[in-house]
Image (cartoon, grey):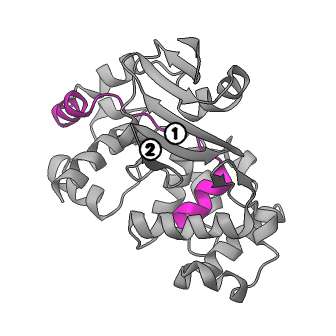
Amino acid sequence: MELKTRNNGIEIVDFGGLNLPLTLDCGQAFRWEYVGDGIFRGVAFGREANVKATADGLLFLGADEDEINEIWLNYFDLKTDHEEILKRLSLDPYIKAAYEKYGIIRILNQDPWETLCSFIISSCNNIPRIKGIIKRLSEGFGKKVGECFTFPDAEILATKTEDELSFLKAGYRVPYILDAAKKVAEGEIDLDKIRNMDENDARKELMKIKGVGKKVADCTLLFSLKFTDVYPIDRHIERATKEYYPDGLPECFKPNSGLAQQYIFSRMIEKR
């Protein structure tokens, strides 16, 4: 992997590749918007990024090397060599076909609090509506960075009431958001400690929050806490799993079942 300074930003090359649209806009993150000319704009860890795929890698417009090294290499999981992972996953013919069609999808390393709250909002919801609620939440209580707003800290949301969050139009999810914020802000749920727990214990810990079931917990574990073998199941994945893996997930998925799930999800979304 190499960083190259361009007159309009920093380009990362030689990291193995990335299908940017599927990585950013296929259900694992909700803060990215396509703004034209191949550019996706989003915010993570308090910083805005404008990123586009190039022939050789990824170009971060207006970024500097410190920002790339401190945030975006880890966020996009660019330090992980996917060649061996995908070689192993491709022992399964369904994943092999998806990989040949879509190229490299990566699991993002997102902020755990934002991810937890986002997937609480995602419950029984669709992606455009999820994005709308999160955008209103960020604009209402976050800080302006560039053209975006940061995701509000749990400590900020923990002080709010249901009436104060009514503008989100999040319905029954509002008390769940507030319960999560209070438990995280008060230290009852310690997301840093969860990172080092056994998978089952970590899941149980997250499920202490109102409205957090197995799927929301698993998405939080996979997309922000590096539990790479977690396999979140929604109705699309459940249907595909029963059809293609009636005897259980293949052994070749371990320890990256979460990445396999993303390839399966991408194919299921395309078929809808």
Question: Compared to 179, does 172 lie above or below?
Answer: below
Residue 70, x across and y down, in percent:
71, 28
Residue 51, x across and y down, in percent:
51, 34
Q: Which residue shows up at 36% across the image and 32% down it?
A: 19
Q: Which residues are magenta?
A: 92-120
Near-viewer residue (89 or 143): 143
Q: Which residue shows up at 54% across the image and 84% down it?
A: 172
What crowding class fits label 1: few (fewer than 14 Cα within 10 Å), some (14-19), or many (20 or more)? many
Near-viewer residue (145 or 172): 145
Residue 267, x across and y down, in percent:
22, 46
What whole-number distance in Å separates the C-alpha atoms at marks 1 and 2? 8 Å
Residue 219, x across and y down, in percent:
49, 53
Please tell me whether the stretch drawn in magenta is mainly helix, strand or loop.
helix
Near-viewer residue (270 or 62): 62
Q: Which residue matches tag 1?
A: 108
* 39 sits left or right of 191 in the view: left
Q: How many dots with numbers?
A: 2
Residue 45 is drawn in which quadrant? top right
Which badge, 1 or 2, is on the more N-terminal residue?
A: 2
CB atoms of marks 1 and 2 within 8 Å: yes
As drawn, the label of residue 204 is none
Q: Which residue matches tag 2?
A: 24
Secondary structure type for disc 1: loop
Q: Which residue shows up at 29% across the image and 28% down it?
A: 103
What crowding class fits label 2: few (fewer than 14 Cα within 10 Å), some (14-19), or many (20 or more)? many
Question: Compared to 175, does 65 lie above or below?
Answer: above
Question: Compared to 39, does 162 lie above or below?
Answer: below
Whether residue 213 is visible: no
